[in-house]
């Protein structure tokens, strides 16, 4: 008779009933305290953070309930003395189960039974990482630009070249998002600017990054370009010893030339590296408007580099500004 009463009470809870039948009058009940812990594949104790577990899902003959991992334990009271099936899962930040236990716990009348749940976290499964993805709009900080382009949200997703998916939507003005608990490997970030109703306005595709085990990495800045007219850009031209790059690069062993804007407030530093013999390079995204310093660096010989800073280059919207320099390798 006792067993049938236990099952009846638990089945009402599992079916979504508003209440669970109380135990019969005069029946002495007990309590069950479930305590969870984690070890890695070598038996070393881990914290919730080290195990990368956010929540614990517990099913005690009824609908599963989620409890914060940091809580460490939970107590179920008013239980009839009996042997109870316990199904427990350690849930990662991403919502993916990290480990699962199925066991039975005995409840004794008139006392609280403490029952340990020891999760073994698969070392391979725990090899996850986080990434911080920042974005700019036309090379400027989002706080001012979001309103100008009518963007309320930034929808950050993994592009088709990614090893796995992620999908996060945050206010555009946040300027960055931390994506947690990713599978290790290479990802291609996309930032889609959206209106309040979800209408997609503009999309920026960033450089690929690699998620490393148990680390928070910073991805390259994703610049979302919204202009529809001619680009704002800087064109850099160079010679070597007053000789054209086509001829001179071969003579000095010139390998590459890197052209980069110097960081300043509100502007995303932009760079490009091209073969020395090309003699010209263009910077477009992230240039911004105003007065900018530009650095040109020539890599030549076995491992030599010479560079120069061209200061106060005036950049105007929808126009091309040109800088020229004659390298003099030693």
Image (cartoon, grey):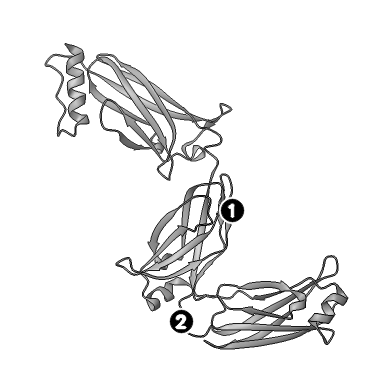
Q: Which quadrant holds residue 80?
A: top left
Q: Which residue is mark 1?
A: 210
Residue 144: x %, y % from top left: 42, 76
Residues marked 1 and 2 touching at CB (< 8 Å): no
Q: Secondary structure at mark 1?
A: strand
- Give how far apart the Cα atoms at labels 1 and 2 are: 32 Å
Numbered disc total: 2
Q: Residue at x 30, y 19 (%)?
A: 84
Q: Residue at x 48, y 85 (%)?
A: 229
Q: Which quadrant holds residue 264?
A: bottom right
Q: Residue at x 62, y 83 (%)?
A: 234
Instruction: Please tell me which residue lies in front, 330 or 190.
Output: 190
Q: Which residue is mark 2?
A: 228
Q: Quadrant of the C terminus?
A: bottom right
Q: Is residue 159 left or right of residue 108?
A: right
Q: Secondary structure at mark 2?
A: loop
């Amino acid at each position: 008779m006792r067993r049938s009463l236990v099952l009846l009470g638990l089945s009402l809870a599992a079916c979504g009933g508003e209440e669970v039948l109380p135990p019969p009058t005069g029946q002495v009940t007990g309590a069950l305290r479930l305590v969870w812990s984690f070890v890695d594949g070598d038996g070393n104790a881990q914290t919730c953070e080290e195990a990368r577990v956010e929540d614990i899902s517990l099913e005690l003959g009824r609908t599963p309930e989620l409890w914060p991992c940091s809580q460490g334990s939970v107590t179920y009271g008013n239980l009839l003395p009996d042997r109870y099936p316990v199904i427990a899962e350690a849930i990662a930040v991403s919502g993916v189960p990290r480990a699962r236990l199925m066991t039975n716990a005995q409840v004794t009348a008139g006392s609280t039974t403490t029952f340990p749940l020891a999760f073994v976290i698969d070392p391979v499964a725990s090899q996850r990482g986080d990434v911080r993805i920042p974005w700019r709009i036309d090379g400027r900080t989002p706080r001012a630009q979001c309103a100008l382009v009518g963007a309320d949200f930034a929808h950050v997703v993994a592009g088709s070249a990614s090893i796995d998916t992620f999908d996060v939507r945050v206010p555009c003005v946040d300027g960055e998002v931390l994506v947690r608990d990713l599978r290790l490997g290479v990802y291609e970030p996309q930032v889609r600017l959206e209106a309040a109703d979800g209408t997609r306005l503009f999309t920026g595709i960033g450089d690929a990054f690699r998620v490393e085990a148990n680390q928070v990495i910073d991805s390259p800045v994703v610049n979302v370009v919204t202009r529809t007219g001619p680009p704002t850009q800087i064109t850099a031209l160079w010679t070597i010893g007053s000789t054209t790059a086509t001829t001179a690069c071969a003579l000095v062993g010139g390998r590459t030339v890197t052209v980069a804007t110097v960081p300043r407030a509100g502007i995303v530093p932009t760079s490009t590296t091209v073969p020395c013999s090309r003699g010209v390079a263009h910077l477009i995204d992230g240039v911004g408007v105003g007065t900018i310093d530009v650095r040109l660096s020539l890599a030549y010989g076995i491992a030599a580099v010479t560079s120069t800073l061209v200061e106060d280059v005036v950049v105007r919207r929808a126009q091309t500004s040109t800088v020229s320099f004659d390298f003099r390798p030693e």
